[in-house]
Amino acid sequence: MVVMLIDIPACESLQRQIVACTRCPRLTAYCAGIALAKKRAFRDWRYWGKPVPSFGDPQARVLVLGLAPAAHGANRTGRMFTGDRSAEFLFRALYATGFASQPTSCSRDDGLTLRDAYITAVVHCAPPGNRPALEEILNCREYLERELDLLSGVRVVVALGRLAFDQYLGILRARGRIARKSAFVFAHNSLHVIVPGRLWLIGSYHPSQQNTSTGRLTDRMLLAVFERARALLP
């Protein structure tokens, strides 16, 4: 594996800026309110209740792009895809394919580390009903763009859900990296060449409880996505 020179202090500075962000009043109020009200099952937890930073290996060649933190998942634990059913599905697949040190993601201090993978989201605050407004997506987009610039080793982007897929393509289109978004059709485990031999995009159904409880997304289906990502790496 070729080791890329990554500006780690800049990556860490960006995450601090994300955590301190107050660009979206609706989301700031919602996250703080959930942290105060809590869920009965987590009444003994001290909720994070603010923007959730990205995490993972800064030398990562695989970037996992989600939608937003869950109200009682990452908004509670303070780490992306940690503490909910989506995390259970995602980390079983990441562990099985060698990208995670363990198959569970329960809290920030559970010892989990990512290897050659990095997890971020389109929006860093939990939105009401899991539906961020367009303005909120645009407010957060700068952070994702800066991460894409800093994570220069990324070779495969796994977009969890159509919205993440479309937002990533939107950035590529704005930067002149692709001619049009319509050339890329979202489907589960769909593979798209962005730069031949250098950068690929894989679409995946999001491991939301709605998808996993109905069987629209199974463990085997999500595992296949990360097996494909692993196979693309030299």
Image: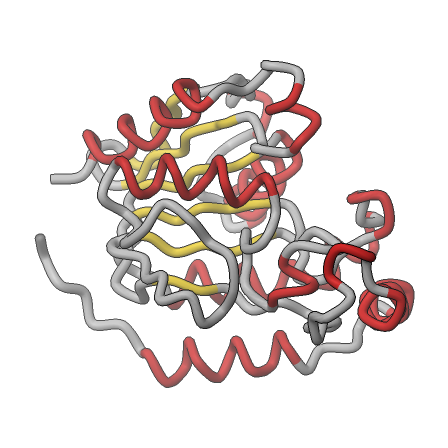
- The answer to whether residue 193 is above or below residue 152 is above
Q: How did the renderer colour the structure? A: secondary structure
The answer to which image quadrant residue 118 occupies is bottom left
Residue at x 49% of width, y 19% of height: 218
Residue at 46% from the left image edge and 54% from the top image edge? 105
Report the side of 114 relative to 204 (left or right). left
In this rendering, the answer to whether 151 lies above or below 197 is: below
- Image quadrant where residue 150 sits: bottom left
Which residue is nearer to you in this view: 172 or 53?
Answer: 53
- Where does residue 27 sit, x and y in percent of width and height? 84, 63
For the C terminus, which image quadrant?
Answer: top left
Q: Residue at x 62, y 52 (%)?
A: 122
228 relative to 143 in the view: left or right = left
Position of residue 202 relative to residue 95, above or below, is above
* Residue 132 location (% of width, % of height): 80, 49
- Number of callouts in the render? 0
* Towards the viewer: 21 or 181: 21
Horizontal side, residue 152 vs residue 206: left or right? left
